[in-house]
Image: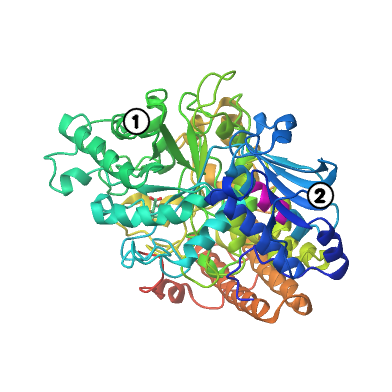
Amino acid sequence: EDGYDLWLRYRPLEKTAQAQLRARATALVYAGGRGAIGATGEAAVAELRRGLEGMLGAAPALGASVKDGAIVLGTPATLPEAAALDLAPLGKEGYLVRSMRLRGHRVTLIAANSDIGLLYGAFAWLRAASTGAGVDFARELRSAPRLQLRVLNHWDNLNRTVERGYAGESIWNWWALPEIRDRRHVDYGRANASLGINGTVLNNVNSKPDILTAPWIAKAAAVADTLRPYGIKVYLSARFSTPLELGATKTADPLDPAVAAWWRAKADEIYKSIPDFGGFLVKANSEGQPGPQDYKRSHADGANMLAAALAPHQGVVMWRAFVYAHEKPDDRAKQAYDEFKPLDGTFAPNVLVQVKNGAIDFQPREPAHPLFGAMPNTPLMMEFQITKEYLGFATHTAYLGTMYEETLATDMGNGNGTVARILERGAGPKDQPRSLTGMAGVANIGSDRTWSGSHFDQANWYAYGRLAWDPRAGAREIAREWVAQTFSPDPRVTAPVVDLLMMSREAVVNYMTPLGLHHLMGTGHHHGPAPWVDDLGRPDWNPVYYHRAGRDGVGFDRTATGSDAVAQYAPELARRYADPRATPEPLLLWFHHLPWDYRMASGRTLWTELVARYDLGVAQAEDMRGRWLRLKPAIDARRHAEVLMALDKQLLEARWWRDACVAYFQSVSGLPLPAGAPAPERSLDHYKSLRFPYAPGNG
Ligand code: BDP
């Protein structure tokens, strides 16, 4: 068990479960027969065979005749009986798995409107069979995705380094492509299809012009060929100034006809090699990237020009709202809203605006981005980060299912309901929306044997995929599914491991950035504490800008007496966030600058509470380690040892975070340590002196 198989391990079931399953898998039938089967149907059949072989020791071959216990795959086109099953509401990608009588036999029918639905149905059946331990797995499974575009964003560079990647090199071996095709890409396709992920952006948002030149299009086309059977479309990150930088045009001004013509021709060229190319992801006028504002044009001008080039081919533009400019140091949290909200309704129909979950930048905890629900006439796509840039890289265990769920379940108070509902609805009038909808996740995938840099980080890829399919799903249930497939369906394993995962992200919040603190991480690499940093080129790159700690107190005043970022939220939320007593404590210092002796709900002062949270984070890291240690007899030796090493490292680093932050905030507050709180192990100067020039992920 080295982790390579992810959650698709299909290990032998115990005897009774095997017997039950065997009776329900006596034959495999693809309705319509061999002649009708395409690459995606083949993938579905192959996966069922692989799963059965693993769980039972042997799998039935693909046969033609329906018999008792058969698994039958059919669409209305191949199986007349499927037409009676009311499949229309399932759309192209949904599926129905049902135990029923067919032509006089008891079968399991996997039905869908298309082969990709059959593949998703096959995975759903395998998931049920491998997690239900033989119990009730054949109940009806009926599901359709609630979002259309369920996409991974690889921040992979053309030299195979990965920006904010902690799992080895990029899995795209660009140098070897297109001639050499990596078997790993097939497994990547399977893993993503098992979750319903249907798109992948191959390259970093900080993009290079080269990716759109002929040799690189050929490489991307080879990847697209491998992923196509798994229902996954390839997209590319486009650099806005590409034609200018390639010397093809004299400007990159989106309103210049020569520029628009270049992009149209480029789109035509791409679609010749990749007929189902998904489209472009664009980071423009953000962190030094070029964009339409360089020519005094708006984000909409830029996005719509690219959208026009892609529209004849049904391609889309995913235009990022992650912008913050040097000239406006007022409050970085406000900038995306300020720039994008006025553009609502001006984007072409094949543009989605991709918004990070929070208004700053993938912090351990952020309130939901105020843009959600504020642009009713523009489809907004969620951008989550799966790779843990600000949560301790791959060595800290932090299950992000709970973090994603927290954002998705936030009611934005603008009459549109939760963020999940807002994403699902897309744009347009409430009663007739159906524009594009989608979710993006910044991938944590690399060439590491575990794919994600650690065993537990696979759970974040998994949770992201499941939530992209159904943003209303619950983080705990997703964790249970993942643990059951990845470790064991035995409740003596699932229950404690799920509990460990469910507490893990809160532990990280506590020992890094409790009570709404944010952006205290070390310069550039973002690993480890550096709340003292105050000398970087831009004010909003410095931790001191975010916590504003002084003798008088701590926290960023985002109420009317401060930056008034609260005014970007709908009235109900704005009112709550404007009042420290009504602000949820986990977000307190995000919105308020409060004196150190402010009384918390617990009755403690803010200072005492802050130190208590840091201590709690360390205690939780210790607790997680203890829980894992007790599981030793139940987990295979290699993975147990590997996870334990990571938890050991996490505990050391949790202490480092706690000690460095407590030492720093004490130096600023001038207050004695609360009674019983241990003194930091080393001096503040020691923590300040630490440097990490070779930290991974800087690209
Ligand atoms: C920041 C990362 C940076 C990314 C940027 C982005 O530090 O590497 O390029 O986000 O999302 O968090 O564009």
Q: Which residue is mark 2?
A: 138
Q: Position of residue 45 (x, y in %)?
A: 64, 55
Give the structural element (helix, strand or loop) at label 2: loop
Figure quadrant of the N terminus = bottom right
Residue type at mark 2: give it: Ala
**Quick check: 565 above or below 630?**
above
Q: Position of residue 95 (x, y in %)?
A: 67, 41
Name the residue located 30 percent from the left edge and 54 percent from the top edge. Answer: 218
Q: What is the chief secondary structure element of the magenta stretch?
A: helix
State yes or no: discs 2 and 1 in contact (Cβ < 8 Å).
Answer: no
Name the residue located 64 percent from the left edge and 73 percent from the top edge. Answer: 678
Camera-side residue: 368 or 655?
368
Camera-side residue: 196 or 693?
196
Q: Which residues are magenta?
A: 120-126
User: Would residue 171 appear left or right of 7 to someone viewing this image?
Assistant: left
Q: Position of residue 505 (x, y in %)?
A: 63, 58
Residue type at mark 1: give it: Pro
Q: Which residue is mark 1?
A: 312
Mark seen at residue 636: none
Indicate if the residue with disc 2 has its beta carbon within 8 Å of ligand 1.
Answer: no
